[in-house]
Amino acid sequence: MHRLCFLGVVALLVSSPALAQPSGEMPRFEEDSCPFPLPDGEVEGDTLACGFLIVPESRGQPDSEEAALAVAILFSRSPDPALDPLVYLSGGPGSSALLEADSWAQSALRADRDVILIDQRGTGYSLPTLDCIEMTADVEEPERACYDRLVRDGIDLNAYHSTDSAADLADLRAVLGLESINLYGVSYGTRLALTILRDQPDGIRSVVLDSTYPPQVAGLEEQPIHGAEAIEYLFDLCDADPACRNAYGDLRATFYQLVDDLNDTPVESTDPETGDAVDVTGDDLVDALFNALYYTPSIPTLPYSIDLMGAGDFDAGLDILRGMYSLDDLRTLASGGELPEADVPDLPEDSPDGDSEGMYQSVECYEEVGFNSLDAAEALAADIPPQLHDALLAGVASQFDTCAFWDSGQADEIETEPVSSDVPTLVLAGGLDPVTPPVWGQAAADYLPNSRYVEFPYAGHSVLDSGECAVQIAGDFLDDPLAAPDTGCVNEIALEFYVPEVCLATALEPADRYADPQDDAEIVGQLDAAQAYRADAYSDDGSYYWLRLADDMGGWVREDGLDFPSDCFMLPYLE
């Protein structure tokens, strides 16, 4: 929607005597200031606008309370944009779309059409919020404490699910006067997009389903096996890559031995969010690897992180596994560079944290738990590697425990049935996605006759974030949903695991200090030659030097006496 068109719609909704809507009439749109810090270069009223969609909290009840859903419209950069905006449906359930305004402001998909962000009911800046503040407080049973508070506050938890959210999106299209819109849903947002196709299909021009969560799958029952499949696939890819296999050996065996060892004897680490000392168990390590596979840019670093921990360096290994260092970060550090300071948005203290746990519980308890069983999940997981079994089942068991008291109603059987629609749909899947596997995307596409299924073999969750190829394919599809997009770039994507390089060096002068992993334990610890690609030491003169492994110089050499190629990787200790 062009800026002038949008402002005109708002003026009509708010000011026109003929269309003025008295307080209490729903749905309606109320223009408001943007509640988040504006992305660089954005000007409110010029390049973007915000407001609230006012809808009934409890649809079908004439005396329903109001729900105010936060909306941001990022106007297209084009002077002549398409008239069908792209509406972003975030995942979770419970994630905030508006907190992603920075990335959407820079998206190439904004070039030709407006992008509309909406915080679904119960999430983000929308009111009422189902955010569970108890999760970060020192309280026993935080989920139960959150549930009790929301009920005391009079929030109708039976109204927070996909069916009512789909009706909200239909209301948004109506109050903004949009003849047609395109939907982009990621993760749970794909479940909502499919619900819109089923219940509110009018005006939907096209849909992009990214990391699909279709209603016909038994999501909780299948979660452990698909998580295990993604982890095993990572190990297979490393084993099939000569560089990865030569550098890290049997990565699968290393990881499973770590899990066994840490379950027997946890190691102390620092919680990256709180700064508190915590014990890390083997099950914690499985959780961390499962979560790391969500983020495609982290995947090339994962074998290295596992190998570091196998060699006893848990601090650096855990930092990499937790996503604190990207592939480019490691390469920058290895070449002696420094990392720029992280650009963290300066959000007001009362900003949402982006994860509405109450909305998550309300949707999952309403739509999933009643159609799944813990016994079935355990049966399906019987044959996964034993080191993964307990960790991957723990979250499923916890969900059943929470839903035993989280009363948000029970969905009808329709929430277990596939969605059929002729609306053109692009289905994106990541081969390493641990939570919404490719088979779920294929299952959704089977009932969408005008769908295009594209699998990215080395991507994790949220394929659109994996790189330019996915964005190009999505852009081509949105330009012409009935034409086959050019997917050739998928075949050009390679997975290059991070492997520190051994240096070939030329002596500048006779080196006065050599360190050999076999003989100099004081300097390089207990690492063997295959693992000792990083070390540091104090020399005899009391100075501090980095050591590098130079095959042609007979082992570890102090770097000040050698001429190393500029692309010779050296990884300092991570700080």
Image (cartoon, helix red, strand yellow):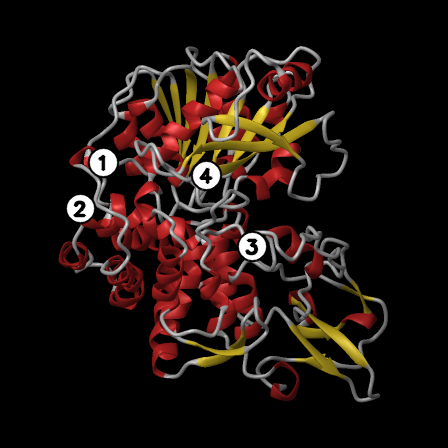
Query: x and y percent of residue 424 in the render?
Result: 38, 16
**What residue is shown with label 3?**
498
Query: x and y percent of residue 169 in the render?
Result: 43, 27
The answer to whether 437 appears left or right of 498 in the picture is left
Image depth: mark 4 or mark 2 in front: 4
The CA span between labels 1 and 4 is 24 Å
Q: Quadrant of the C terminus?
A: bottom right
Is the residue under label 1 in contact with that under label 2 (CB below 8 Å)? Answer: yes
Q: Tag 4: residue type?
A: Ala
The CA span between labels 4 and 2 is 29 Å
Mark 3 / mark 4, whichever is N-terminal: 4
Say which element carries label 1: helix
**What residue is shown with label 2?**
371
The CA span between labels 1 and 3 is 43 Å
**What residue is shown with label 1?**
415
Residue at point 60% right, 87% down? 521
82 in relation to 37, above or below: above
Give the quarter of the image for residue 162: top left
Q: Tag 2: residue type?
A: Phe
Is the residue under label 3 in contact with that under label 1 (CB below 8 Å)? Answer: no
Q: Is residue 254 visible?
A: no
271 in relation to 53, above or below: below
Crowdedness near tag 3: few (<14), some (14–19) or many (≥20) residues, C-alpha within 10 Å: many
Query: x and y percent of residue 245 in the render?
Result: 44, 57
Residue at point 64% right, 42% down? 35
Q: Tag 3: residue type?
A: Tyr
The CA span between labels 3 and 4 is 48 Å
**What residue is shown with label 4?**
67
